[in-house]
Each structure stands twice: as structure tokens, then as C-alpha cells.
Image (tube, rainbow, N blue to C red):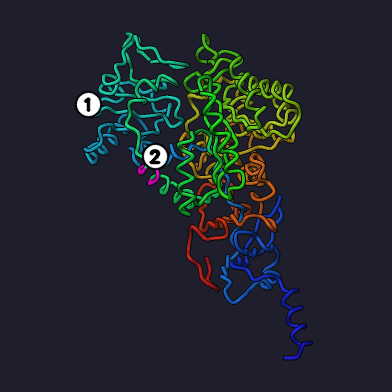
Amino acid sequence: MTRLLLLSLLLLAACSPPQADIILLDGKVWIARESFAEAVAIRGNKIAAIGTSEEIKEYFGTSTRTIDLGGKLVIPGFNDAHIHFLGGSTGFLEVDIHSSVDGAGIVKTVNAFAAQHTEKPWITGRGWQYTWFPTGLPTSEDMTGMIEDRPVYLRSYDGHSAWANRKALEIAGVTQASKPTGAGQLVVDSKGVLTGALLEDAQDLVGNLVPEASREEKLAVLRNGLKLAASLGLTSLQNASGSLEELSLYEELAGANELTVRYSAALSVGETTPPETIAAYNKKRAELASHPLLRADAVKFMLDGVIESHTAAMLEPYADMPESSGGFQIPLEVYKRLVTDLDGQGFRIYTHGLGNRAVREALNAYASASGANGPRDRRHRIEHIENIHPDDINRFVQLGVLPSMEPIHADPGPMAVWEKAVGPERLPWSFAWNSILSTGAMLVFSSDWPACIDINPLRGIHVAVNRRTPDGFPPGGWVAAQRITLDQALIAYTHAGAYSSFEEDMKGQIKNGYLADLVVLSDDLFQIDPMKIASCKVVMTIFDGKVIYGEQASEGSNL
């Protein structure tokens, strides 16, 4: 070989695109607002190129894996920006009552589970809805026929209420005279007898006695949870509560190369959180600063409760309980002091603010912290915002605060009790996504799993776009003026979540140089009837440049 020929070959190699590890061809790749490409080339864990199928073929090499998409839609991996992943995964050890419909259904499901698991000293579960019961809360009469030889402790789907059978109450020593710590209530009937329903912090009177899963059990259920996440296209999770012990579980999974999501922790903090816990978490933040999958730079406050149990903080009394406007789970002066302190330490802050007064007070606290600690790009968030006063809608943009909301919570199916409590005057400002987006705010979406009726992002997107259940209820949409476009919903579930954690320059979009976290869907969401969004499926999930869910397609095969 002559020197000239060798030089020519070297120059040709230098000018040729690098060989891709995976090429996705002949698809519909969503790259921006109603903007699409046909194909994607992946090299390592990054996106190497985006373009037409013909252009991307330049990245083909002898070891390249080619996947023919057959026209299917490709989107960035979903980012669930508010989730309680260990709590949801623990459900694999418990009785699932989500589909029970009423008290009789719960009894049947619980008794069958108890018969199959005679080794369990406690029967625990989650998933009942307020609309299943005449009073909005379960009673012992609603649960007639429930097993009595073992304690039963069942949390509501949103985790803000629970029901305990007589055996559980006896073991916990709970009587009408018992006093919960913090904000909570033991519900009694008209005769002053305990119904078994426990609201907010009153849950701890019984729940703290439930045997905790072992570390090995927690790791096992997290592995199951990760499989579920992959099947739903979830490639990033932002935990909305937790501890250093919980974070260590994800560190162990990451160390064993078993972690198939990008995980962001949030430490639960409150009035009694020891300073040494904050110091230890701050140290962990520094340790994980350059970790490819883990980060720990956020803290989470619980400011109020939920509307169904009248524990969310409202500016005006509840429509169906005029003697109450809810309240706070932490004294406002303590909350504001802690927000200023933790903001000064550089943490991102999440605040559970569900009622319109809680939303206002959280905005006030963030404004106060900014005034005390000086200007910077904070990206603090308020979580849920199920009802908001119209005077506060513009404040998100003004303060640089992110509205973090769960579209699945606005599914009209379980909303009867919620709507009755809010009343008609406040209803137009319920889950006000469209109003908030119209100000230019960055809306962030999530599921709140397991405090939801469905973790599936596509079910949430269905609600955001339609404000209707998959079977079409109600016909005109629930507070239909607040529905948003498909593009807006997808951005909220991908790019906006990445933005909220200062990761928008590396994930959340299909863009050259970004992390190769991609999802292939069974249907083109931009072409199908919007009422069919909830029935769409994930057919392939690619995480960190590797196919972790779906058909193990080979070169030239179709999905």
C-alpha cells in the first residue's frame, strides 16, 4: 500500500461518521414541538445523530444493531418528577385493593389474600378511594366480614388516610381518647365510636406498628419496580420523599449495575428533622455530584393534606364542611424559617401544597427565602396544586417557581368527593394546567405513585389532553378549559422534569449529544383519536443506550 493511498484511507476514516451501536430507522421521532425526524443513531449511551433514515445509514457499521421502527413514534424517556418509588414497589408484598370498587370488594380481596399468606402477622394494602363509601371514608360496617384474627391496615390510594380493623386498633392501644401527634384525626361515628378511619398523622398510631420490610425485601421489590418502570417507558425518577437509608438502596443497585433509571432523591424534612440528618444529606449530595445515575440535592416538605379528607389548607371554608378550611402539617413560621435555611444551603425545595392557601403560603416562603439569600436560579417546586387562587397563577413565573403536578389526580372517575368539598366557585381553578402554562411557567408532570390510581405516564397524558376517563366520562370533559395540548403534556413529562433538576442540557429531549433514553410507542399519539391515548403501549424502552424492555429486535427486523 502506497503512502498516498494509506493517507487517503486515513483521511476518509477521519471524515466518516463514527459507527453507531444502535440505529432506529423509518420511524417518527418527536424532537420538538410538532417537529419530527425519521431516525436516530446511538453510540455508547449518547445520541449520535438524528435525521432521515438515509442520512442515519451513514452511521452503520459491522456491529451496528439496526431496528426498523415501521413508522412507530419515538419520544424521550418519561421523567416521573414526583414519585415514592420504594413505597410503590413495596406494594408487591401487600394486598392490592385498587380495583375493589367498594367495601364488599375490599373484604373479598383482603380475605383471599390473608388465606394465601397465613405467614403474615399483619395484612397491609393500599388503594381504596373516597368515592367508594357513603361518607367518603370506610367504616367497620362498610368492612363487614373482614378477617378479625389478624390486624388489617389499609391505606387510601393517596396515602393521606387509612383504615384499621378492630384487631389493629387493639394492638396499637388506640381508643377514642388517643391523640395523634401533628395534624391528624381519629374518625368517630355519631355515637362517638371509632370507625377505623385514620386521617393524616393519626395513621402513625397504627402504621408505626406494621413490621418493616427487611433490606433484602426492599431490594427485591425495587428490582420488581424497576421492571415495571421499564415496561412503562420510565427512564428518570425524582423521589418526592425519603431518607438516607432509602437512598442507600439505590446506591447498592447502582453499584451492582442493576439500576435502570436515573434517580434523584429528596430528603423528607420537617419541624423535628435533626440538624445532623441535614448535614449527612449535604455530605451525600457532594459525594454523588458526579454520579451518572444518582443525585441528592432536594428536600421535601409536607405543608398540608388533601381535599377529600378536608385536611388541605384552603383560603375559604370547604363547601361541604363550612366549619373547616383545613390546616397545616407544620407551623407556618417554622416552615418559612426552614425554607430560608435550606435555600441558603443550596438545596432544591419541594413543598406539598395542595389547597389554594397552602400554594399561596409556599410561594410566600420561597419569595422570602429569595429576599433573604439573594438572587439565583433555584428551581424550587410546589407539588400537586390541586386548587389555586387566580391571583397566584402569575407568581410562578415571577418567582421562578415550578408548578409540579400529577395529571392522573384529575382523572374524573374518583373526583365526586373532591368536587363536593371544593364547591362550584373554586372548581374552574382546579388542576389549572392551561391557566398556569399560559403565563409561561414550566409545568412539570408526574404520577405520585403509589398515591394515584395509575402510574402509567400515558394514562396521565390522556387525562391532561382530554380531562376525561378512558371510557369517556364526563362527555364534555371535567373542567375542560384546563386541558392542554399533546405537545405540552409530553414536554411536561420529559423535558420539564429534566429542567426541574438542572439536567435539561443532557436529557429530556432527543437531541445530538443527549443521553440515549428513548421510548417507542405502539401508536402515533399525534394521529390517533386523543381518547385512545390511554390504550397506547410502550413497545420498547432504551435506557443509557441499551434496550431494557421490548422485543429484542435484530438487524432488519420490525417492531
Horizontally, residue 374 falls left or right of residue 449, namely: right
Instruction: Look at the picture and state if 111 lies above or below 208.
Output: below
Question: For the image shown, how many numbered marks are present on the structure?
Answer: 2
Residue 195 percent location from the top left of the image: 33, 17
Image position, residue 105 (x, y; %): 31, 33
What is the magenta range? Answer: 216-220
Q: Dividing the image into 4 quarters, which one contains the N terminus?
A: bottom right
> Nearer the viewer's eye, disc 1 or disc 2?
2
Q: Which mark is residue 90?
A: 2
Left or right, residue 286 beside residue 435: left
Which amino acid, by three-letter code, is at mark 2?
Thr
Q: Judge whether residue 269 is colored magenta.
A: no
* Residue nearest the viewer, comparing 39 with 108: 39
Circle 1 residue: 148
Secondary structure, mark 1, is: loop
**Disc 2 element:** helix
| 306 relative to 16 in the view: left or right | left
Disc 1 and disc 2 in contact, CB within 8 angstroms: no
Tell me: residue 466, above or below residue 233.
Answer: above
Q: Can residue 6 be seen?
A: yes
